[in-house]
Image: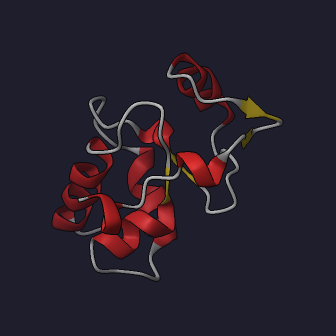
Amino acid sequence: MDEIFKQQIYEITRLIPKGRVSSYGAIAKAVGYPNHSRHVGKAMGGCPEDVPAHRVISSSGVLSVPEFQKRLEAEGVVVENLRIKDFKKLFWNPLEEI
């Protein structure tokens, strides 16, 4: 995977505020690759510790990594059955927010 692509993903992800979530697809669109959400997910698998990967979830509002639930709940995000409650309200769209 291209290192510049990964760095762009990480920079966008670092901008997601605490208590908010974004999606793999939204991040992919923000870096100019709208059909590469899976690549974003793959990049998140090996991201640096300062990248809040727990705030990036599927576009359906479901956690891809169950272990991230505790981190999200610590930020005030309510998760029920691995699904973000009020997903649309908490969704952070990088194309609109930055």
Image quarter (top left, top right, bottom left or bottom right) of the N terminus = bottom left
User: Considering only vertical position in the picture, is 51 above or below 9?
Assistant: above
- Residue 20, horizontal then vertical, whole percent: 47, 40
User: Considering only vertical position in the picture, is 40 above or below 14?
Assistant: below
Which quadrant holds residue 73? Answer: top right
- Residue at (49% x, 61% y) in the render: 24
User: Considering only vertical position in the picture, is 49 above or below 70?
Assistant: below
- Residue at (70% x, 49% y) in the render: 62
- Residue 88, horizontal then vertical, whole percent: 62, 55
- Residue at (61% x, 57% y) in the render: 58
65 or 32, nearer to the observer? 32
- Residue 33, horizontal then vertical, whole percent: 35, 80
Left or right side of 14 for 66: right
Which quadrant holds residue 86? Answer: top right
34 or 87, nearer to the observer? 87
- Residue 53, horizontal then vertical, whole percent: 43, 40
Left or right side of 14 for 23: right
Q: Residue furthest top?
A: 74
How many numbered marks appear? Answer: 0
- Residue at (23% x, 67% y) in the render: 5
Q: Residue furthest left?
A: 4
Q: Residue furthest right?
A: 81
Q: Residue furthest front?
A: 89
Image quarter (top left, top right, bottom left or bottom right) of the C terminus = bottom left
* Figure coloring: secondary structure
